[in-house]
Each structure stands twice: as structure tokens, then as C-alpha cells.
Image: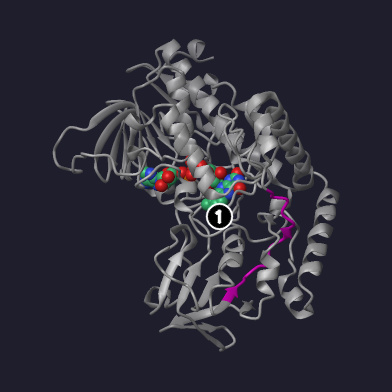
Amino acid sequence: MTPAATAPAAPARRAGGGAPPERARIVIAGGGFAGLGLAIRLKQAGIDDFVVLERAAAIGGTWQANTYPGCQCDVPSHLYSFSFAPNPGWTRTYSRQPEIWDYLRGLADRHGLHPHIRLGHELTGASWDDDEQRWNVQTSRGDWSAQILVDATGPLSHPKVPAIRGLRRFEGKVFHSAEWDHDHDLSGERVAVIGTGASAIQFVPRIAGRVGELHVFQRTAPWVLPHTDRPTTRLERRIYKALPAVQKAVRAGVYAGREFFLLGFIKDRRFMAGAERVAAAHLRKQVPDRELRAKLKPHFRLGCKRILLSNDWYPALTRPNVDVVTEDISHIHGRTIVLADGSEREVDTIILGTGFHVTDPPTARLVRGRDGRTIAEASATGVQAYRGATLAGLPNLFKLIGPNTGLGHSSMIYMIEAQLNYVLDALRVMDERAVATFEIRPEALAAYNARVQSQMAGTVWMSGCASWYLDANGNNTTIWPDFTFRYRRQTRRFDPGAYVLRRSADVVRPALAA
Ligand SMILES: Cc1cc2nc3c(=O)[nH]c(=O)nc-3n(C[C@H](O)[C@H](O)[C@H](O)COP(=O)(O)OP(=O)(O)OC[C@H]3O[C@@H](n4cnc5c(N)ncnc54)[C@H](O)[C@@H]3O)c2cc1C
């Protein structure tokens, strides 16, 4: 790890201190897979006039922030990595957080990204200046002026704290799984875990044997499939190193298998019925106690919420010091969690495994478009983005992993790479046609979104469960409801006809735009 990757970049000017903003052609907010991936692609294309603003003290995004015990990817390593930067040395078939974080830091080193990265720089506001045809970008450590703003702040980077009365006044220790407090010793403590999603099922088995009591508060029992993770062998790693084509073939096989599984999500439920039988057998085998098994039985179609993989979640819940609580929480007072039925659990620490602000990220309230409204204000009925990347009224802005680009079955890195192709091609078009600004035409966006939502209807994600894929209006603004290769195809080229393009002052004529 280089020093530049771990310490805030210095020196920075104070916001509002009167100094003129720094200028860059492209400002990227967020230093996770998406922001760093774009930085690499820009450098490969010979574009150097960009910065990456990262609020944290280190790059890596998800894999820097989530250091909870057991944090691991649930997509095989060969696919959960950039196709242009394969890693023959993965030590497990499903990588754990430290190894993915190392992978990203290694890429930043190898591609010379550090001079472009500004750590400890949180985007605090951005507004489009139509006269200057530039973005004014505010950060916690000074302002920037950019021709193009890329929001790569991540779909799962803003921890969600549940609205439980009294939680903020809890007299013990509280932390979110994405902000794990490693200085806090859980040994022998009475611990409550709220939530049974993808993070909780990874860290609960790691802490269950260490704590005195563990109360796991479950609202919905998830579907859990057996995990096939294993260490890779030295021979495998040697083969991948010597023969990259073999690793490529393995990646292609993993990819194809995942796309095939998608049929169960979008077309034929019979595929899911098979997986449901496997998951039900997994539960029967690992949880002999009938009463506990009944609590852990899911009551929605597999795939409607994220499918979880684990071999040690159920065994952890059968331990004598672990209690699965399905009663709703009424409120908290002092150190006591009071349930809706009046019963109580007194605990020393509460760990929130309650996920993230996915459909309502804070950045939507920070970025203002041409009419001065924030993204949140302009999209009261649900946020929409053309190709998941460009938004109405927001010229020269790309959102990476924007609306309807999330997946329930495969690797987000594949989707990120597709978006990077789109951004790079847009830059090519801008350069070739002397375009100063692009802005998605509302009718193109509406038609695109209507197609996405009509494909969404009838998929497993809309089969009636409450999930973080749905926004406050019940719309699924998170998931890409089709094969990922179709998304890749749609984003291979920037499509100027869908945009209003302007030179410094003029609207580019339709003939040019077509
Ligand atoms: C625990 C966990 C496990 C996951 N497992 C998988 C998996 O198995 N498979 C899969 O496909 N996906 C998984 N994901 C989803 C994962 O987030 C994506 O795969 C991918 O890492 C997203 O990359 P990103 O760069 O878009 O976002 P992130 O990695 O979240 O990076 C966003 C960056 O933006 C920064 N940022 C946020 N706000 C600001 C601001 N205002 N100013 C400046 N910087 C800001 C953040 O600090 C962060 O560094 C998982 C997510 C989590 C949380």
C-alpha cells in the first residue's frame, strides 16, 4: 500500500475561503471500483485532466469501508474483478474483503492513479452553471470547477440507521456493520444484531462464539444457499499465471452460469423452484430444532430479495447463547430493547446490519441541475437514468451504477465496465464533434425507462416481498431486469441522438447530433 493511498491528500484549501476553485476537465466523486475503474480507463485513453475525490482516508470504496469480521464477496473472484486486470493470484474462489481491497490498491499503484486522488475530500455540493457550461463542485476541502462530473459515490456506501425510538439514546455501544468498531471488544458481552441480510449473515458466525449472549433480530428470514467457497490451490494459481487464457475461460464459464441462472429471476420460476429445494434442504440439515427452523423459513420467492450464501449462518443460530428474535422492536430505553409483545432484552452493544440508503442516497440531495433543483427534488416519483448513467436536467453528468444497474445474480464489476465503455465513448464523441455539453432528452429517458420497467413487471423482484431494491413508491429503481450482456451491448457506444448536444453556446444541429 502506498502512503498516498492511506492518508488524506494535503494540503487542501478551506471551502469558501475565497480561493478560486481548482479546475479539471473531469471530476470523479468516489474512489471505489467504479471511480478507480474510470480513472484507469481515462489514463489508458491518454486523458490526464481529471481528479478522484474520495471522502474516506483511503481508496477502495465498499472494500475499504466494510471491514467487519467475515466480509466476503458472494460472486466468484474471477468475475468479481476487472476483465482488463485479471488477478491470477486470488487465494480463494470467493475473495474476502482484505484481498479485494489489496487488489484495488494494487491497481491504483500500477496505473499511477495516486497523483489524481484526493483523499478526505467529501463532495458536499455540486451545481451546474449554464453560462460557464461547467460544474461547480464543493468539497469538504475546497472547490472544483469541472466540465464533466462523474458521480461514483456507490450504491451501498451510505449506511442506513433504522428509525427505532430511543436508538440514539441507547446507553451502550452502537455501530453499523459498515463502520465496524475494531477497538470495541465484544468478548463476553450481551450483543444485539439488528438485521439478517448479506452482512449480518457473514459477521454473526464470526462473533457468536465470542460474545456472552447474541440476540439476532430478524424481520424477514432470508433464503440461504450452501456456499461453495474454497481456497484456490497453488497449481491453479500457477496455471492462471502462466496461461491467462485458462483464467479467462474460467471467468467466461462463471459468467455464463450466472446468466443462465437469471432465467429463474426473469422468465421461468421453475429454475427457482430447484434452488428453493436446495435451500430448504440446507435449512433442514443444519437446523434440527423445529421451532427455530420455522422462524428461519423464508416466506417469499427465492431471488425477490438478495440470495445469501453461507455454511455457517444456520449453525451459528443453533448455539445455546444465540436467540433469534422475530418479534418487532417497539423501542429502546437505557440498555433495554423493548419488543412489541412487551418482552425485553438487555444488551451492551447493538450492531446494525441494516443495509444502506440505496434508493435515497444523500448525494441526490447535493447535486443541483440546470434548473437549480437537486436530483431528489427533480425525481420525487423515483429516480430515472438513461442507460443507468445520465439524468434529465443534469448536463455533463454521469452516474456510475445509477438507477436500474444493480444485479441480483452476477458481478457489479461487469456492469461498471459496461458504463465505463459508455463514458469513454461519450468523451470520444465530445472531442470529435467539439461538443461542450450533452444532456439527455426527456423523451429518450422516458422511453428507456418505460422499457426497463415493463421488463421488470413479472420478474421475481416484483413478486411481492419488501426489499431494498424498491424505492419509497414501490418502484424497482435498483435492478437491471435483463441479461447483463444486453446492458453491455446497449452501453458499448454513446448514442448522440438521445441527447441535446451543444457547442460552447449553440445547440448542435440535429444533422450533427444524429
Ligand atoms: C458488504 C458488501 C458486500 C458486497 N458484495 C458484493 C458482491 O458479492 N458482488 C457484487 O457484485 N457486489 C457486491 N457489493 C456491491 C458493491 O458495492 C459493488 O460491487 C461495488 O463495489 C460498487 O463500487 P462503487 O465504486 O460503485 O461504489 P463503492 O465501492 O461504494 O465506492 C463509492 C465510494 O464513494 C465514496 N463516497 C461516497 N459519498 C461520497 C462523497 N459525498 N464524496 C466523496 N466520496 C464519496 C465512498 O467513500 C466510496 O469510497 C457489496 C457491497 C457491500 C457493502
In magenta stretch: residue 276: no
The residue nearer to you, when weighing 100 against 51, is 100
| Residue 220 counted in the magenta span | yes
Residue 276, x across and y down, in percent: 80, 58
Q: Where is residue 335 in the image (x, y as percent from the top left)?
A: 43, 83
Q: In this view, does 165 lie above or below 7?
A: below
**Between 512 and 56, the one nearer to me in the picture:** 56
| Residue 285 on image: x %, y % | 81, 67
Q: Is residue 145 left or right of 158 when viewed as pictured?
A: left
Classify residue 209 as left or right of residue 124.
right
Residue 386, compared with residue 325, is above or below; it is above
Question: How was this image coloured?
Answer: one colour
State the predominant SS element of the stretch in magenta. loop
Label 1 is placed on what type of residue?
Cys
Name the image quarter holding residue 373: top left
Check the picture and name the quadrant holding the N terminus.
Answer: top left
Viewer-closest of 229 and 152? 229
In the rendered view, tell whether residue 509 sits above or below residue 122: above
Q: Residue 313, relative to residue 393: is it above or below?
A: below
Q: In which quarter of the image is the C terminus?
A: top right
Which range is magenta? 215-230
What's the residue at 48%, 54% (across, down)? 66
Which structural element holds mark 1? loop
Q: How many labels does the image show?
A: 1
User: Is disc 1 surrounded by few (<14), some (14 to 19) or many (20+) residues within 10 Å?
Assistant: many
Image coordinates of residue 73 in percent, x first then y, are 60, 48
Mark 1 = which residue? Answer: 71
Disc 1 beta carbon < 8 A from ligand 1? yes
Kindly tell me whether residue 249 is visible in this rendering.
yes
Which residue lies at the image location 42% right of the left edge and 14% below the top edge?
431
